[in-house]
Amino acid sequence: MSAAQVVTLRVGAPAHGGHCVARHEGRAVFVRHALPGELVEAEITSGGADARFWTADAVRILEASDDRVVHPWPEAGPGGVGGAELGHVALPAQREWKLAVVREAFERFAKMSFDGQVHAAPGDDERGGLAYRTRVSALADDQGRAAMTVYGTKERKRISAMPLALPAAEEALLAAKAKPGTRIEVAVSSDGRVHVAWADQGDRSAVIERVTVGDRDLEFRVRSTDFWQVHRKAPSILTEAVNARLGDADRVLDLYAGAGLLSVAMASQGRMVTAVELHAGKGRSSLSVNLAPYETSMEIAGDTRRTLEAMAKDGVLFHDGAIVLDPPRAGAKAATVAAIAALEPGRIVYVACDPVALARDAALLAERGYSLESADAWDLFPMTHHVETIATFTR
């Protein structure tokens, strides 16, 4: 079968990853740039005659959904760069898409129902789901200009726009020049300052971030290349949501603490916080700096699972406390979930950027005696398939 083969498909339900599922001669086809219910001509992008499934791009729309809109970033359309795979979907329908994906993940992998919603971040509707990213990055092309990878390939294309970014971040990214192949990192801090870093120069630029949590204004010092939530409103949304789920827990173990966003927010309320983070590089970490003003907090630099196992060996328990975790996209996984449960926390608050990973870990927690109390999601990545979910588990 030629990779350029085009087939006509009636598109079905959305699937995790930004695709919709269609069927062709009994085979599943995962189609990008389509909407449920549409009739499309799709170009097969991967899969041979014996493959269990194919992937495809919708290249011609024969019957369009009422939720189809003009993509705000044509460079990310069929055959283009990744990063805005839902740009052809009206913003309310994007949230319905993500809600369907989260529900299906919980039902399939956790055998649980997801009764929450996908909430919009303040201001996103007014801006059409654009201009929200405070962090953007690209690889320098052969001329040293910002380029991104064509989805499913190793090919890089220079970009002429980045409408998902704050205007200042977009301007800085497109103006940057670097050695070919170097990653260009742009961060716009909460005070509007623009920081540009190149991967081969190390973490030289300090960024000051201010986050409002309830009636408090918190300040963070992070390196420009440290992980930080990219949506302009995400830090406030997530810290307030996590704090609300902790109840009266005065002892909290914060796993995968990063630069300390959640740790500081919890410590600012007078909670005793122990933050665990495996640091890369040398020198004092952003987490250490940000936790320093809070006498009720402490930091442990180390691997999460090994740290939990050492605590359990020492008899540490969290019966009246809580464990908060915000793991990488792959989730905590079985060994770490077992180590969390061994500390017997009264409450677990799980922040997840991947609903399938969360659902799989929810099933593991259920095996350890933890039930899902509640869960909700936030659309902190408009125009993409990503969604942030927070779930609370209790013994």
Image (cartoon, rainbow, N blue to C red):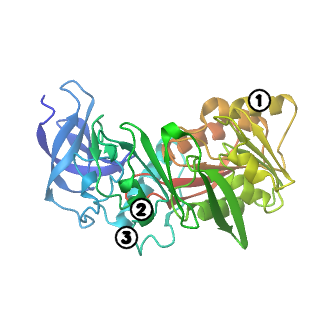
Find out whether the residues at labels 1 and 2 contact each other: C-beta distance under 8 Å: no
- Category of crowding for the residue at label 1, using alpha-carbon neighbours closer than 10 angstroms: few (below 14), some (14–19), many (at least 20): some
28 relative position to 216: left or right: left
Q: Amino acid at mark 3?
A: Gly
Q: For mark 2, what is the residue?
A: 95
**In the rendered view, would you say 36 is above or below 70?**
above
- Category of crowding for the residue at label 3, using alpha-carbon neighbours closer than 10 angstroms: few (below 14), some (14–19), many (at least 20): some
- Category of crowding for the residue at label 2, using alpha-carbon neighbours closer than 10 angstroms: few (below 14), some (14–19), many (at least 20): many
Labels 1 and 2: the sequence-earlier one: 2
47 vs 164, nearest the viewer: 164
Compute the Cα span from label 1 to label 2: 39 Å
Q: How many marks?
A: 3
Q: For mark 3, what is the residue?
A: 128
**In the rendered view, would you say 264 is above or below 210?**
above
Labels 3 and 2: the sequence-earlier one: 2
- Give x and y (percent) for residue 120: 48, 67
Report whether residue 68 is seen.
yes
Q: For mark 1, what is the residue?
A: 309
56 vs 361, nearest the viewer: 56
Find out whether the residues at labels 3 and 2 contact each other: C-beta distance under 8 Å: no
Residue 160: which quarter of the image? bottom left
178 relative position to 29: left or right: right
